[in-house]
Image (spheres, rainbow, N blue to C red):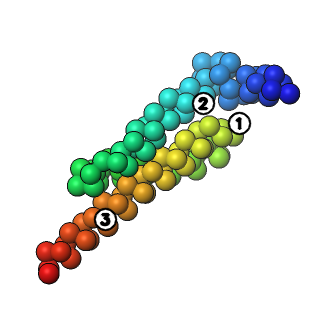
Amino acid sequence: MATSKLQALWNHPAGPKTTLSLSVHFWAPTFKWGISIANIADFAKPTDKISYPQQLAVTCTGVIWSRYSMVITPKNWNLFSVNVAMAGTGIYQLSRKIKYKMLSSFRLLE
């Protein structure tokens, strides 16, 4: 059973064994997971070190490419999942930064 699933993935139109133009549909999102993993690692980073432009770019990239991955043929679930992860981690980091800024400004008023 596992062999047939691996063979199906291998022979899928968006799988690793495709022509050059379609191999981007497999390898680019696979390596893009590194960005999401790095963003998850940054959850431990001090909030004042979070960059608005960087996290906004990660979030927008995730949202835009998640949509794109559902309109292309063949549907690319690897691209979709990595971009949902990017959007989610970016939104989380932005919410941490906004919350930090709001709490900091309230402390200044006290």
First along the sequence among labels 3 and 1: 1
Give the x, y percent position of residue 55.
Answer: 35, 50
Q: Quarter holding the C terminus?
A: bottom left
How far is mark 2 from mark 1, CA to CA? 9 Å
Left or right relative to 55: residue 75: right
- Amino acid type, residue under disc 3 in the picture: Ile
What residue is at 71 percent from the left and 36 percent from the top?
74
Query: Do labels 3 and 2 touch, CB within 8 Å?
Result: no
Dot label at residue 98 = 3
Give the x, y percent position of residue 11.
Answer: 76, 22
Give the x, y percent position of residue 53.
Answer: 29, 50
Query: Do labels 2 and 1 touch, CB within 8 Å?
Result: yes
Is residue 7 or residue 109 the one in the foreground? 109
First along the sequence among labels 3 and 2: 2
Q: Which residue lies furthest to the bottom in this view?
A: 110
Dot label at residue 74 = 1
What residue is at 39 percent from the left and 42 percent from the top?
41
What residue is at 76 percent from the left and 24 percent from the top?
6
Number of the front mark, 3 or 1: 3
Q: Name the residue under label 2.
A: 25
Dot label at residue 62 = none
